[in-house]
Amino acid sequence: MTQHSIFASARWTVASSIIRKLFSFALFIVIARVLTKDDVGLFREYSLILTLGSMTFLFSLDYLLIVSKEKIENNLSVIFKLILITSSIGTVILFILAPILGRIYHSQVLTSLIRYTSVFLFVENIRRLLTALMQRELRLKELAIFQTVNVIFYTLLTLTVLIFKKNVWVLVLGFYSGNVIEMILLLWSSRITLGKYLKQKGKVREFLSSNRKFISFAWVNNILNNISGNAPVLVLGLSFPIAYLGSFYLANQIIILPITIITTALLQVFFPSFSRKANDEVVKHIGKFTDFVLIVAFPLMALYALVSYSYLPLIFGAKWVDASSLILALAFTSALSLLTNPLSGIPYSLHKPDIELYWSIVSSGLKIGCILFGAKYGFLEAIIGFVIASVISQILLLIIVLKLLSVKQVSYWLGFIVKLLPTIVLGLFFWIIYNLTSVYATPIGIVLVGIYYLMIQRFSKYDLLTDIRNIAFSKEGNRRQSS
């Protein structure tokens, strides 16, 4: 995959991500207005438990399928059979554990949700496996279409049913019905590949023996990453009312909206492509990507945080006003994830999941410790502790990635700081302007960011327009990607 084709793939996935987020955000506005904080918090708790269960019984076999340098016929048959077995076992175990999980998080409704929808764990794992298969084959445009159909389907279905029934069951069943549709589309699209390679008689024992190290490290690492990333929900849900989790979920959904559009798409592109590139090529892409994030994306992120803080109660209703402060706190770690999330697959691509595992252990311990310390003083303080720990762990991950690729740390971080300064200055201006005139803060902020971009294009060496043009209109990338 060339640089042009990477940009072209990113363009397709970013475009489809925007469409998906427009639909899901419209749904989220309705949900926030018609459902209670408890319902929203309960949905987040349920979805996180299901995700953790899915990852536990997937054993990171999807990651192995993507990065494996062996021929696909040597792996796919064994991986598919293993996932069918482990997912079936996981579904039964989740059903059995439902009452215990309900008691831990003080919700009988959660018990019922888990018990009667545990089959979604099986669906999730098959969907993840087929997604990995399409990523390996670089069928990214087709994958983006299926994911978009998923979102449009569950959005329209949930909105329709909410007219007649307003509770968390509608949200859960509506959301995961979209995943069922996506799984069916993926199965149909992959039927030729599956039919061809599933007939192969792979040796399970030999497969597990040769890949034991990768599977073990990647499996534990993915679970720890998910726990550390969602530590506020997992930890604070034990002691704070579930309505608090609803506020956190809303704030987090809003602030990561532009992040997930970009990073989900880019990770989907960069992860499989990096696994096939030499280190010096990866380093060049990282340099360009870092420049783009720091110079172009960070100022937009600061502006987005200002807009979100200003208009959240107006859009979602006064009952969510307490989420505004959470948005400002979460903006810091969300912005940095623009850079770290797409690069997080590099240790896997280099077949060194053990290194990222050590980072995950440190990161998880740091986040949980800071959350518990902050919780002594209040919910907001606990979230601030989470943010501080997250920023530290994200910087540590960047250091690890740069070291793996033999990048000169001093020059990289000096450039990082210099390119970060404009965002710091803009953020300070936004804070001052908001305190002086909250009504006009947003339009003034837009003007300031526009002036900043004009100055970058006119007075700096960074060619802003060329980078945007490469991402948006790369015809060569289109040709190579479609081939």
Image (tube, rainbow, N blue to C red):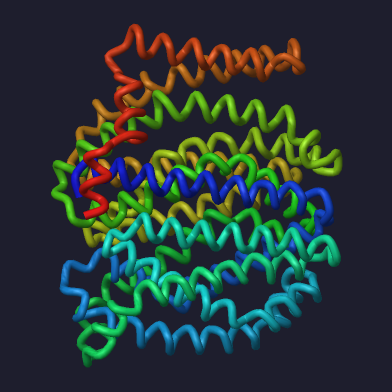
Q: How many marks?
A: 0
Quadrant of the drawing holding the C terminus: bottom left
Give whichever of 255, 16 is nearer the camera: 16
| Residue at 41% across, 49% down | 13
Q: What is the x, y in percent for residue 302?
A: 56, 26
Residue 5, relative to residue 101: is it above or below? above
Give whichever of 292, 157 is nearer the camera: 157
| Residue at 19% across, 81% down | 74
As drawn, is 108 to the left or to the right of 173? right
- Residue 167: image quadrant is bottom right
| Residue at 64% across, 42% down | 254
Q: What is the x, y in percent for residue 50?
A: 59, 71
Residue 354 visible in rendering:
no
Residue 261, relative to residue 37: is it above or below? above
Instruction: Name the outermost residue toward the top.
Output: 459
Residue 341, relative to residue 290: is it above or below? below
Give whichever of 195, 74 is nearer the camera: 195
| Residue at 83% across, 40% down | 317
Q: What is the x, y in percent for residue 377?
A: 75, 43
As drawn, is 344 to the left or to the right of 234? left
Residue 145, relative to residue 438: is it above or below? below
Residue 24 visible in rendering:
yes
Q: What is the x, y in percent for residue 350?
A: 22, 57
